[in-house]
Image: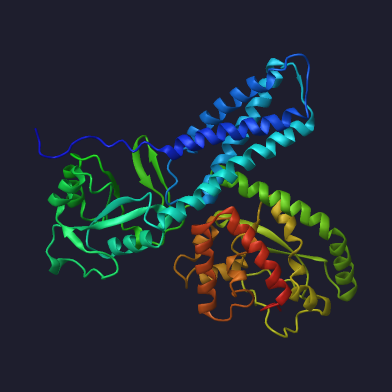
Amino acid sequence: MSAYNRHIRQHWSFLRFFHRLTDAASIGCGLALAARYSNPASDDSWPLVVGAVAVALFFVFGEIGGVYRSWRGTTADREIVSVLSAWSFTLLTIIVLDVVFRAPVDYSRWSLVVWLLTTPSLIVGIRIIVRWILTFLRARGLNTRGFAIVGVNELGIDLAKNIENSPELGLKLTGFYDDRPSERTVELPENVGSKIGNISELVDHAREGKVDMIYITFPMRAEDRIKGVLSALGDTTASVHVVPDFFVFELLHSRWTNINGLPVVSVFENPFYGVDGIVKRATDIVFATLALLLVSIPMMVIAVLIKRSSPGPVFFRQRRYGLDGCEIMVWKFRSMRVCEDGDKVVQATKNDSRITRIGAFIRKTSLDELPQLFNVIDGSMSLVGPRPHATAHNEEYRKLIQGYMLRHKVKPGITGLAQVNGWRGETDTLEKMERRVECDHRYIREWSIWLDIKILMKTVLVVLSRQNAY
């Protein structure tokens, strides 16, 4: 009998059980409220039947969509989108089943609306409250799991700092492990942690249950060393993660996938795939349509003023790069006496003589951008994204700024992260364009629907301030 305690510690999650229980209760409560707006024909047991089917369907779609997986280290918006997707599919399936089997229930529109809104509100609300409670507890050392880092290097230090700055993860550093002598490793800062031992000692500690999670931070070129560590840790039940040193690349919303079981990682990727893409597009259509309804009369007034102020068309269309670098035609109100769209386009500057009197006003107030709502409706642009540059400027700057064309991995936007961070207007120096591109890359890496809403709200303040608008 080995001296080591080899029992498998099952990390049974009370939290997952709790969420399943509260999700079922939320569906039941929402259905109970919806029942008040329906007229059952003869069978008063219909809410129980529909509720049971809805709970079963939500559990199935929840498992498929990862609703009940561990959300440690994942932002709340991802969990919320997963929950809302599972509920949408559940409700849609319920409606289809009702049509096919002709349930003896006279539903009113209000009953569906109440159920549609009440249930997800309860489910999401409970999860947000649980997140707050867990963050509070984990910040005080409760509900934590011990983790170790294999590799005394810069990546390991960065990982330790990131986890330390994220108490909501509930992870507590045990220490660093590395077989290499101190002269071949970097010096560990005092506030990060210390080297505990070598790989053999790590295996012993993992067997004894002192370490729950292990992160390997060796560089990708050290393939044999990584294989050796993985082989040694195969005799433990610790959760092992390999942290590849992809920081050497300019990552753009990378994600893992596989091709017939062969794992691959994307380096330059569009973040709007699957549910995220549907949410992004739906948000664009809804908000752009509402905006057009609100500004239709002001747009007609602006069109008349432009036509009366100077000869030329009301609208100005310019060739620009869209998604994946495909050429699109961007609409704007004409604000200049010229309509440049050739191989050389001169950016507008302060007190530019080409700008008309009404053009100066609509440029300062950003009203000249309103026709781009039509671009959003037709799908060539988004409300939020990297601002599209003239084709001539793209060809110029792609030769000067590394990774410049990566900003076209998403649709261009009417407003963007760069515009609300002070990089709006003329880019008369290379540094200004570099800062703008950095913001565009950051937007693609960190995108969420909440970031879009935040940018839209900040845009209102930027437009009112009229900063760098001419």
Left or right, residue 111 beside residue 241: right
**Residue at image x 57%, y 28%?**
55
Front residue of this view, candidates 202 and 359: 202
Number of marks in the rendered image: 0
Left or right, residue 445 beside residue 55: left
Front residue of this view, candidates 365 and 448: 448
| Vertical comparison of 44 with 354: above or below | above
Left or right, residue 271 beside residue 6: right
Q: In the image, residue 70 lies at what x, y percent?
A: 42, 43
Please state, as top left, top right, bottom left or bottom right, where the N terminus lies in the image. Answer: top left
**Residue at image x 31%, y 53%?**
243
**Residue at image x 61%, y 58%?**
452
> Is the image coloured rainbow, by chain, by secondary structure, or in one colour?
rainbow
| Vertical comparison of 426 with 89: above or below | below
Front residue of this view, candidates 387 and 101: 101
Please state, as top left, top right, bottom left or bottom right, where the C terminus lies in the image. Answer: bottom right
